[in-house]
Amino acid sequence: MATQEQNTLLVAANKLKSNKIKNTPQRQVILSYLMTSHAHPSIEMIFKYVRKNGFSVSLATVYNTLQLFVDHNLIIEIAADSGGHMRYDYFEVPHYHVICVNCNKIVDVFDDSYKKNEKIAIAKTGYQVLNSQYEVYGVCPECQVKLKNKAVRI
Amino acid sequence: MATQEQNTLLVAANKLKSNKIKNTPQRQVILSYLMTSHAHPSIEMIFKYVRKNGFSVSLATVYNTLQLFVDHNLIIEIAADSGGHMRYDYFEVPHYHVICVNCNKIVDVFDDSYKKNEKIAIAKTGYQVLNSQYEVYGVCPECQVKLKNKAVRI
DNA sequence: TTATAAATGATAATAATTCTCAACAACAAT
DNA sequence: ATTGTTGTTGAGAATTATTATCATTTATAA
Ligand SMILES: [Mn+2]
Ligand SMILES: [Mn+2]
Ligand SMILES: [Zn+2]
Ligand SMILES: [Zn+2]
């Protein structure tokens, strides 16, 4: 419904303001999409989403906006192995990603215990740590079935 | 010295054989480079290394070979954020990477405790897990000094 | 309001990656 | 060792992804 959409745009606008990022329609809608979607969308998906929702946008603006959000640590880039496309994800609550190497589906796991390794990294390297990411690669339950049912070579 | 180089090539050749990968000069030298280097090299670095060492090679072969090794879980791809280039690393002994967002230096941390999260991922998602990677982003000690000594805006 | 600095977007330019296919090489079977 | 089969290599073309350009528009603060 329309009020719901208005509300997510408002939430995004406030998030922009609190990060001292100039508010534009394109940034609002891209951020609200990333905040509410579970799709971990690619550049192309984001571009299409924005236009589908009645906003004007160019690919250049999508690239610029996502880089801006990454620089502000609002979102993360995920290298989803095969296909080679980057995927994007709002990253307020720490979590990690389980990625199907067959269909590229990305599933969230909300367990921040992997973050403990940051402390070890600091102790061992002297780096000033900004953030960290954990990715697990495997085969999703659906693809396990699909692959099992494939005929084998005789 | 020459015998040492011969030896690493031999080790690589045996690794290819045990993975049922057809042995070619290009594959041998690329794998031996990844096995011995700590540079986490990019495609371009690998391409130059192979030619510098007297082997003929094309970029297409470097791309093909690295993809083959990734598919066999011999090496991993690391998305080194800025610059956008993929980096490659022999991955027999589990470890993770601490990456400087300023100079792109990649440091190994040989601590496999991050691997424990694979079990949680399996339990929560039902994925059949093949491998996992952990990356920490931050500023290396050298860049911390460089950035501190920069004049600030008044 | 108005001024100013910044953002947008159409398009061009560049860079990265994949494709094509003829020549070549590995290796298993004889 | 020779041969045949199958898979690999590589030059260059084609494609795709990403960044740069810059005139126009817009957000925000004074
Ligand atoms: Mn996520
Ligand atoms: Mn490494
Ligand atoms: Zn799948
Ligand atoms: Zn550094």
Image: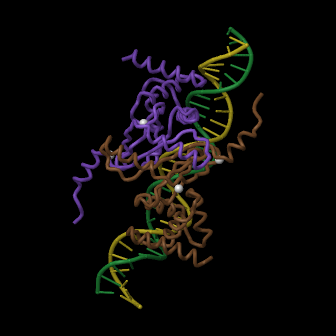
Chain colours: A purple, B brown, C green, D yellow
Residue in front for this viewpoint, A3 or B145: B145
Label count reads 0
Q: Quadrant of the C terminus of chain A?
A: bottom left
Residue found at x 51% / y 55%: B110
Which of the 4 image quadrants contains residue B71? bottom left
Up-down relation of residue D25 to residue B151 (above or below): above
What residue is shown at x 52% (from left), y 29% (from top)?
Answer: A57
Q: In the displayed structure, does residue A64 sit left or right of residue A48?
A: right
> Residue B57: where, in percent of width, then height?
55, 67
Quadrant the N terminus of chain A occupies: top left
Q: Is residue A40 visible?
A: no
On screen, A33 above or below B123?
Answer: above
Question: Picture coordinates of residue D2 (x, y %)?
Answer: 39, 89
Q: Is residue B86 visible?
A: yes
Q: Camera-side residue: D7 or B46?
A: B46
Percent across and percent down for residue B127 are 32, 46
On screen, residue D6 versus residue B114, left or right, reads left
Front position in the image: B142 or A67: B142
Say which residue appears at 63% left-offset and 76% top-offset. B1
**A148 relative position to B7: left or right:** left
Q: Nearer the viewer, residue A64 or A89?
A: A89
Looking at the image, residue A9 lies above or below residue B28 = above
Q: Position of residue A88 (x, y in %)?
A: 47, 37
